[in-house]
Image (tube, rainbow, N blue to C red):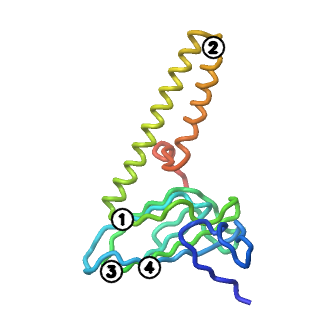
Amino acid sequence: PPKPTIFVPFRVWTSQKIKNDYLPPKGYATYRIKVNVQNEKKEKQFSVFFQHPFSASKLYINGVSLFEVGKVSANLDEMVPLRLNTLVDFSTKEQFLDIVIHFSNRDYFRGGPRGQFLLASAKQMHRYQLQNYLVEIFIFGLIFGAFVYHLAFFLLNRNQFVFFYFSLLCLTFLMRIPFINSKLYLFFIPVLP
């Protein structure tokens, strides 16, 4: 018998049920949406953004492959997982966008997309991404200041271990920030193919 097709919003497929059973995390799926983006047919710039999915993804817009993260495959032995944020700029004269995203997963405990799928003008999207970077850099700076401040207090009074422990806690947060959400480390260490 043919495998069931279910229609879900842009979220992980492991949160979906078929016959009272949740879908397994390992597998592959296709997400599709058709969006009306303009009334007149003139060239416009758009951007698509979605946070690093659980494993590999491939994006098509109006039948054209625009971006692939990792290698998507129905055969899980052939797929190559890679978790990166996806930001794709493109231009179109079309009134409708037919957006198709393929996902495959074999390594993570959830399968499919993570977070929101965003579509906006290129200018709006780049402003949104810049704001996210600035917020993360600001938070990084605050925590770095707290780390240095409490470490300095500990070095001045080595009997107060609470300052040392708090500085270590700040350090663990500092090491985590560049690797989540915006993945700031990619500015300094690009991903090699």
Q: Which mark is residue 95?
A: 3
The one nearer the camera, 107 or 160, is 160
Real-space Cα separation, disc 1 to disc 4, in angstroms: 14 Å
**Mark 1 and 3 residues: CB-CB less than 8 Å, in contact?**
no
**Residue 177 picture location, percent across and down:** 53, 41
Placement of 136 over or under 114, stated as above or below = above
From the image, tell me which residue sits under label 2.
Answer: 160
Real-space Cα separation, disc 4 to disc 3, in angstroms: 10 Å
Mark nearer the N terminus (4 vs 2): 4
Screen quadrant of the N terminus: bottom right
**Residue 191 picture location, percent across and down:** 53, 51
Mark nearer the N terminus (1 vs 3): 3
Query: Which tag is nearer the camera, tag 2 or tag 3?
Result: 2
From the image, tell me which residue sits under label 4.
Answer: 34
From the image, tell me which residue sits under label 1.
Answer: 120
What amino acid is labelled 3 in the image?
Gln
State the residue lying farthest toward the bottom: 1
Secondary structure found at label 4: strand
**Residue 78 picture location, percent across and down:** 68, 68
Placement of 163 over or under 58, stated as above or below = above
Secondary structure found at label 1: strand
- Picture residue at 33% right of the left edge, 80% below the top: 94
- Picture residue at 36% right of the left edge, 65% below the top: 120
The one nearer the camera, 76 or 25, is 25
What amino acid is labelled 1 in the image?
Ala
Mark nearer the N terminus (4 vs 3): 4
What amino acid is labelled 4 in the image?
Lys
Mark nearer the N terminus (2 vs 1): 1
